[in-house]
Amino acid sequence: MGIIGRIRTFFANLLPKKEYPLYETCAFCGERSYLPFHCEFCNQYFCDRHRLPFDHACKNLNAWKKRPAGNTHSTNGKK
Ligand SMILES: [Zn+2]
Ligand SMILES: [Zn+2]
């Protein structure tokens, strides 16, 4: 067993920890959505139509606007 085994263990450990709801209610319109979108700026879940910060009047819309395009997934530990 070399590096492959270690990588497999690494990912096996990662997967169960990731708590992502299959179904969640959109915090904006209340619609139940399959595989909802998570907004990292207000920490809520939204449906397909309201996934973007300006679509759900995100309370941290300004923080989102300041972010460079294409880098919306990195939080850099800022809570
Ligand atoms: Zn919605
Ligand atoms: Zn938001």
Image: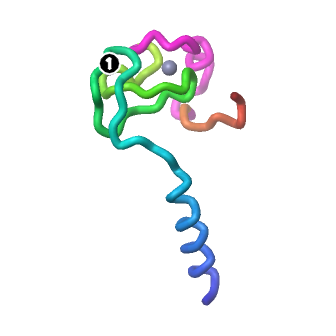
Residue 34 image offset from top left, x and y in percent: 29, 37
Residue found 29% across the figure and 31% down from its top: 33
Q: For residue 66, which quarter of the picture?
A: top right
Residue 71 lies left or right of residue 57; in this view the side is: right
Residue 46 lies left or right of residue 64; in this view the side is: left
Q: Amino acid at mark 1?
A: Gly
Residue 52 lies left or right of residue 10; in this view the side is: left
Residue 50 image offset from top left, x and y in percent: 36, 20
Q: For residue 58: magenta?
A: yes
Residue found 55% across the figure and 21% down from its top: 42
Question: In the rendered image, which quarter contains the N terminus?
Answer: bottom right
Residue interval drawn in magenta: 55-71
Work out whether residue 62 or residue 45 is closer to the camera in this orientation and state it.
45
User: Which class describes the residues within 10 Å of circle 1: few (<14), some (14-19), or many (20+)?
Assistant: few
- Kindly report the secondary structure that dominates the magenta region of the rendered protein: loop
Q: Is residue 44 above or below residue 36?
A: above
* Circle 1 residue: 30
Establish whether ligand 1 lies closer than 8 Å to the Cβ of label 1.
yes
The residue lying furthest to the bottom in this view is: 1
Work out whether residue 1 or residue 22 is closer to the camera in this orientation and state it.
22
Residue found 36% across the figure and 32% down from its top: 24
Residue 74 image offset from top left, x and y in percent: 61, 37
Q: For residue 70: magenta?
A: yes
Q: Secondary structure at mark 1?
A: loop
Q: Is residue 62 above or below residue 11?
A: above
Question: In the rendered image, which quarter contains the C terminus?
Answer: top right
Residue 18 image offset from top left, x and y in percent: 52, 50
Q: For residue 62, which quarter of the picture?
A: top right
Residue found 62% across the figure and 77% down from its top: 6
